[in-house]
Amino acid sequence: MTASRLHYISWTFKIREADEPDLHTAYRERERRMRVEQRGSKGKIKAIITGVTGMVGEGVLHECLHHPDVEQVLVIGRKPCGIWHPKLKEIVHANLFDVSPLKKQLTGYNACFFSLGVSSVGMSEAEYSKITYDLTVHVAEILAELNPDMVFCYVTASGTDRTEQGRSMWARVKGRTENALLKLPFKRAYMFRPGYIQPTKGLKNTHRYYAYLSWLYPALKLLIPAHVTSQKEIGNAMIHAVSRGYESPILHCKDIARLAKSDPIENRD
């Protein structure tokens, strides 16, 4: 499943744009250095993707399979994704709380697009934390150990609280997860905070209620672009986060849109 569907279409757009200004400054400097180092690089992306049976993960997988910069994709999940493609490999693993038996198979990748999550509705904080924090950080720690050159992209949600002090339980837990991921020794890590997500036509894991909302997308994109994105934009932004980088580790909808259509590294100052 993807992160809470309620979070994705929340109309309480109180986004904390100013999280950790020093962290943003450090990322901008790192991205400037990276662009100099990577000019002329022809390296291809080898990505691990989780959560492909959910809406966001399916969209990210779809974009990866059709993007020329992505050479190989490894999907990890509790059940088969039901997709065949020459780029695609799959591991079906029942216990994602312990992926240590998979270490050999998880080595040699330079990207992870982590889209696995659940809704907090009806869950206690302990239950929600076990999946959102414990599972995510466990997998991330293993990947950071095995692949120090990896770029890690995590799908969180608009309204995430990195102070970990707010009233909203899900926002606190998501914030704690973001904070833990940003401390791990990845090459870079990015936290994607979408609002409303427009589905890609033809994909099968779109939530039913999007049939009643999708027609509003052009108007929403025009009126409130800071709070609207799409499966296509998220997928392409994640790919570009690996190949081109971004100035901030926290990406809201406007950042996702900007990165999704960004110019190649060699064309940027």
Image (cartoon, rainbow, N blue to C red):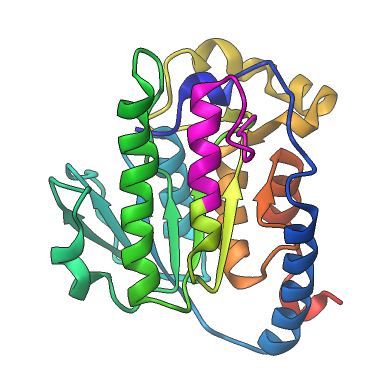
Residue 202 drawn at (x, y percent): 43, 33
Residue nearest the observer in this picture, 233 or 148: 148
Foreground residue among 61 and 105: 105
Q: Which residues are magenta?
A: 159-179
Q: How many marks?
A: 0
The location of residue 195, given as percent across then percent down, is: 63, 29
Image-quadrant location for residue 193: top right
Image position, residue 87 (x, y; %): 33, 66
- Whether 49 is drawn above or below 145: the answer is above
Residue 170 lies in magenta, yes or no? yes
In the image as oriented, which residue stretches furthest toward the top?
A: 212
Can residue 32 be seen by looking at this rendering? yes
* Magenta region includes residue 237: no
User: Would you say residue 72 is visible in this rendering?
Assistant: no
Residue at coordinates 45% horizontally, 67% vertically from top-left?
111
The residue positioned 13% from the left and 65% from the top of the image is 101
Residue 3's place in the image compared with 255, above or below, is: above
Quadrant that contains the C terminus? bottom right
Instruction: From the viewer's perspective, tell me whether residue 124 is left or right of residue 259.
Output: left
